[in-house]
Image (cartoon, coloured by chain):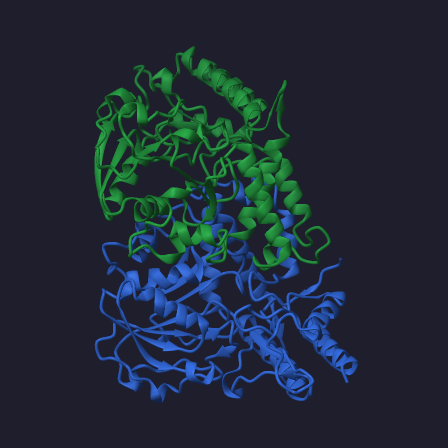
Chain colours: A blue, B green
Amino acid sequence: MTRAFNFSAGPAAMPLEVLQQAAAEMTDWHGSGMGVMEMSHRGKEFMSIYAQAESDFRSLLQVPRHFKILFMQGGGIAENAIVPLNLSRGGVVDFVVSGSWSQKSLKEAARYCTPKVAASSQASGFKSLPAPSSWQLDDDAHYVHLCTNETIHGVECHSLPDLKALGSNAPLVIDFSSHVLSRPLDWSRVGLAFGGAQKNIGPAGVTLVVVREDLLGHALPVCPSAFDYRLVADNDSMYNTPPTYGIYMAGLTFQWIARQREGDLSGVAALEQRNIAKAQQLYHCIDHSQLYVNEVDVSCRSRMNVPFFLRGDDGQPLLDAAHPRNAAFLDGAKARGLLQLKGHKSVGGMRASLYNAIPLEGVQALVEYLRDFEKTQA
Amino acid sequence: MTRAFNFSAGPAAMPLEVLQQAAAEMTDWHGSGMGVMEMSHRGKEFMSIYAQAESDFRSLLQVPRHFKILFMQGGGIAENAIVPLNLSRGGVVDFVVSGSWSQKSLKEAARYCTPKVAASSQASGFKSLPAPSSWQLDDDAHYVHLCTNETIHGVECHSLPDLKALGSNAPLVIDFSSHVLSRPLDWSRVGLAFGGAQKNIGPAGVTLVVVREDLLGHALPVCPSAFDYRLVADNDSMYNTPPTYGIYMAGLTFQWIARQREGDLSGVAALEQRNIAKAQQLYHCIDHSQLYVNEVDVSCRSRMNVPFFLRGDDGQPLLDAAHPRNAAFLDGAKARGLLQLKGHKSVGGMRASLYNAIPLEGVQALVEYLRDFEKTQA
């Protein structure tokens, strides 16, 4: 098969240029006589790769100097423990529950602290985001946890809340796994941001943590050293051997992002504009069809993850993954080189993830297929 | 530079064939239309890669069915916490202290249990292994920790102890990070084995854990879910998103190992014979020189990591890394394409790591250089 359009929710499509450069450098990086995988993490070759990746990420997202950028391991699920191990001090933590991921985060945090539900959209099936004005924030909370893009439910927080204006002095912790680098970020409202790399950054196995320096140094005694942010920061992410190749791939991706252009815009701003256009095309197609449905509140629809259902003959969403119409849809998509559109098993249906590496042409091909498939079902 | 001989202690040299195959498959794996990094870990393509890697490792080391093979994240340093979190039950654990790595393991375990030093070779500068007959094993120990190859001090345990014969019923936990797959392993003497991948397996960022099933299910309440062996085992290493590309590279390495031949031997047995020959050549050269010295007891010299010092004009080992003779040695080595020979910063001197991917020709080139350099210093 030639390269397909790959709508996987993660691990996910990567820019072709990045993969090609990695392949070309696999056995000999820049004339060093060795590939990146084979370099000591303490050698000058890898140290230069690391420093460039860190600096490029800082530049792309304009991360202020008083934040540390850490490259860690374990993904978002490990961070669900590592964040409270480092920040909770065993006390109260506020959670905004807006989908499966924040639910998981809350459950795991309960091992180390006293999580409180400040707001939840569970009653409405996670089809909207609780309005910040309705959040019940605890005066004693050590931080407020918010998943700013719920990958499974397709819910995105398009504007970070101003906790100070809501009367809270707690730092905001965001799980930005599935939309990091898809848009600029207002660091004045963030205490810590974390995310697995396998959506917009690079291969699975790298976790990015961006943390305000004043939050370091308060790990609980049971926090493993390898996951103590203070130790990781003091050792430039080399307290334990870092996932060197994943960091290199992330670095190549950062360079690719910096090269992107849309009109006068470049980098993340250019990608944001492109991502808005991509999402608009797909949601427009879904909303104007009789066959497809996305029930997420328009104000918080995700630009990155678009879950949708096909309707049955009765007009209701086909929740049954084994329904012949669902199978026919996926088979037809695959035949056109449109891959990994099956929805998460916990909710069923379909999901198209439109991360940075998906070009506008990929979304156009998908929209065309959606329209053609609908005609066959009339 | 053409491909060098790379003696890094880890991340370390990988077989050229493995790197070339990875490069060739980077943008399209087996006609799937996507690279391995881009695949959902839940899709049938990656599931087949995972299953093959697991099965090949089991076959190479003849791992019995009642052991689970887990692919995790965090490396040996994270396992220093994860092992006691899962196995110690907060009680007593015996440690054999034979070098820097077992020292680190003991220190970290103290967060979760009561570590006891059953034996230590620290007083002699970690130049030998404490004889098993001298170990003071605790009747209440939940396991006995042994680092079977100390990467920094170059000390290897060539025959696993029989704890039952020593009067202990505790399972043996071995850190086999730096010699896994270099020789066969007697699983009847092992309860759990763990190791970072970045020596003989693949890229940094993958950790291999092989654990006897009856040891699962006893994690402490503060163990992060992502590192609870029971959950990891029950989810085929996919409780959190696994480091998919690293697992793929490990799988390619396992296939490469299976193809190795020495006379009638194949696989790990063939590599063991080759590794013995490689180590003998280098130690012989060192022992018969006036310039180089390795002070490790001959009975427990590592086949994988050969630390050595150059002598000064007074005949004493040159501990000062900045000494001109040390610098001249490393510069001359690099000029011949012999890379990453500098010793660990904690001990100084030199270190040649002779992992599986280093061919006999690499050791011959190193020996030739050692002899030539010695002549220049006469």
Residue for point 55% across, 85% down: A295
Left or right: residue A17 versus residue B135 is right
- Tell me, yes or no, if residue A142 can be seen here: yes
Q: Quadrant of the N terminus of chain A?
A: bottom right
Give residue A375's quadrant in the image.
bottom right
Image vertical order of residue B200 relative to residue B165, above or below:
below
Where residue B333 appears, x then y in whole percent? 50, 27
Left or right of B165 in this view: B374: right
Residue B305: horizontal and vertical position, in percent?
A: 43, 28
User: Total marks drawn?
Assistant: 0
Rendered residue at 56%/77% (across/down): A303
Quadrant in the rendering for residue A18: bottom right
Where B206 falls versus A141 (above or below)?
above
Residue sitting nearer the eye, B263 or B70: B70
Residue in view at x 54 percent, y 65 percent: A200
Q: Is residue B172 left or right of residue A351?
A: left
Placement of the C terminus of chain A among the 4 image quadrants: bottom right
Looking at the picture, how far across and down is residue B373, in whole percent? 47, 19
Residue B139 sits in quarter: top left
Task: Determine whether A62 is above or below A124 in the image.
Answer: above
Residue lying furthest right in this view? Answer: A376
One can see residue A33 in this view: no
Percent across and percent down for residue B300 are: 37, 20
